[in-house]
Structure formats: C-alpha cells, structure tokens
Amino acid sequence: MDPNEIRTKLISLLTTVAPDIEPQSVDPALALRDQFDFDSMDALHFATAVSEAFGIEIAETEYSELASIESAGSFVAARVAHAH
C-alpha cells in the first residue's frame, strides 16, 4: 500500500467514526482534535478502526501516533511494512 492509499483509507475511516467531518476539510498535518470536535472516545474508535482495517496492533500508549492523518499514515506504513 502506498502512502496515498493509506491516507485515503485513513480519511475514510475517520469520516466513518466521525460522520460530521467532511473528508475534503481534513488538513493531514494538523492534529484531529485541533481541527474538529474530536474527543478521546473518537480517538479510541478511530484507533480501533485503523487497527482492524490494516490488521495491525495499536497499543493505547501509541494512540498519540494517530493524532493527525499525516502521523497516522507514517505509523500505519511502518507497521504494515514491518508486518510483511
């Protein structure tokens, strides 16, 4: 999976978890909580969705890696590459 595919999938997962977020309004570099009304439960649901969608384990201590789409993309890319 290339970085653009990962980013697209992450935004799709994000809008599933938080349907009020418009995909085109997401700034990949900014923390989700700084852009949207994204609370800790949203973060938990997003982490769970990412874990299931990409087949990777995400420890609670690693949730901060998913703070923005950009950081989440890097985290997922590294995990997916490491798993294969």
Image: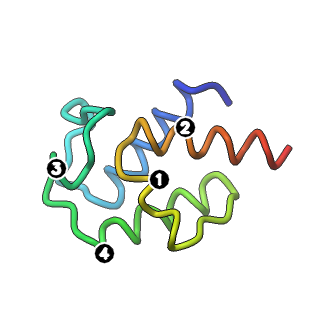
- Whole-angstrom CA distance, mark 2 to mark 1, is 9 Å
* Residue at which label 2 appears: 74
Q: Which mark is residue 75?
A: none
Note whether 80 is above or below 16 in the view shown.
above
For discs 4 and 2, the disc positioned in front in the rendered view: 2
Kindly identify the amino acid type of the residue bearing the numbered disc 3. Answer: Asp
Q: Nearer the viewer, residue 25 or 27?
A: 27
Residue displayed at 33% across by 33% down:
28
Q: Which mark is residue 41?
A: 4
- Whole-angstrom CA distance, mark 2 to mark 3, is 19 Å
Q: Residue furthest right?
A: 84
* Residue at which label 1 appears: 65
Mark 2 or 1, nearer chain start = 1
Secondary structure under the numbered disc 2 in the rendered image: helix
Q: Which quadrant, please, contains the C terminus? A: top right
- Whole-angstrom CA distance, mark 4 to mark 1, is 16 Å
Secondary structure under the numbered disc 1 in the rendered image: helix
Q: Are marks 2 and 1 in contact (CB under 8 Å)?
A: yes
Mark 3 or 4, nearer chain start = 3
